[in-house]
Image (cartoon, helix red, strand yellow):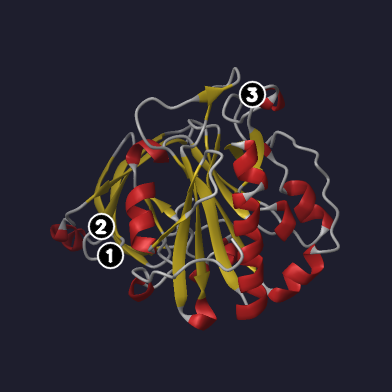
Amino acid sequence: MLALIGAECFCAYVQPPLGRVRLYCRLDQTTTLAFRMQIRFPQFKARFTARFITRFPLFLAALGCTFSLTAFAADCPQFSPGGQTPIVVNAKMRASTQQLCYSDFAVLHSGITHGPLWSAEHLTPEHIDDARDNTRTNRFFVDKKLPPGESATLSDYKQSGFDRGHMSPAGDRWDKKGMAESFSLANVVPQNPSNNRRIWARIEQAVRRLVEQSGDVYVVTGPLFSGRQLQTIGESRVLVPTQLYKVVYLPQRKLAFAVVVDNTPTNQYTVKTVHELEAMSGLQFPGIPDSLKDQRIGGLKGV
């Protein structure tokens, strides 16, 4: 769910007997989220839609229906800075999404791509130390919390030529439950095998070293889909990412950056600013201060 804690919201109208309600919630100076809800009585069945607009209807304040929206807070805010999970601003990407909360990471799953759009984790040096002694389960599974037909299946990956690439890595999991959960297909994407086992593994290890050196670190990992002709695998037609990204935020060092890797057998990666990654991905990372979103590091040590 969207992280909208504290957003200023106004009712546009309430129309009986169907119970139509339109709400506008101002996220910042330029972005507003418009909600439309239709409630049917007496069954109390609700239909709910949302869209982003760029102009806020100021006249709504006079309608006397003003409040701070708290009901749409993230289900598992502990994995994002300030409890503010990434926001999907691309309308097509927002369709058929569901947030899944696991014991030590969170995922926004897409029923269109049949995989995660982002996977968020909050790591500490203690987590990394404990993860060294944690044994991989290697038991991939379909998360039953997802609606039928939205998840990838185990058979989709068989003989596909792609690895089941973790977004929140198994190597970061510090207890048995988190390790087992990391093998949910909601946390993996079709990844080039050479990429997954070489350049991507080195990037994951470099992030772990940063955690050990810098204290707590917030990491968001996910796929990018560029172009109109995207490859798919399996009967579910799981979309194959063209690129993969990581956004890394080190609050104690006041440092934030992103890395992007082509989903090919490459040995190269590109450092991006958070603002650049936001433009590429159709996501926003509200928990990272804007003042840090234009930082660019030289590279990751050991990659």
Q: Quadrant of residue 176?
A: bottom right
Disc 2: CA contacts within 10 A as few (<14), some (14-19) or many (>=20): some
Q: Are marks 1 and 2 in contact (CB under 8 Å)?
A: yes
SS at mark 1 in the image:
loop
Evaluate whether residue 220 shows in this view. Answer: yes
What's the residue at 67%, 75% (across, down)?
212
**Percent of width and height locating residue 4:** 41, 60
Q: Are marks 3 and 2 in contact (CB under 8 Å)?
A: no
SS at mark 2 in the image:
loop
Which dot, 3 or 2, sits closer to the camera?
A: 3
Q: Earlier in the sequence, mark 3 or mark 2?
A: 2
**Percent of width and height locating residue 30:** 21, 60
Relative to 108, residue 31 above or below: below
- Image quadrant occupied by the C terminus: bottom right
Disc 1: CA contacts within 10 A as few (<14), some (14-19) or many (>=20): few
Q: Which residue is mark 1?
A: 28
Distance between the Cα atoms at labels 3 and 2?
41 Å
Q: Quadrant of residue 237?
A: top right
Residue type beneath disc 3: Ser
Residue 160 — which label? 3
Q: Which residue is mark 2?
A: 31
Q: Earlier in the sequence, mark 1 or mark 3?
A: 1
253 displayed left or right of 172: left
Distance between the Cα atoms at labels 1 and 2?
5 Å
8 displayed left or right of 219: left
Residue type beneath disc 2: Thr
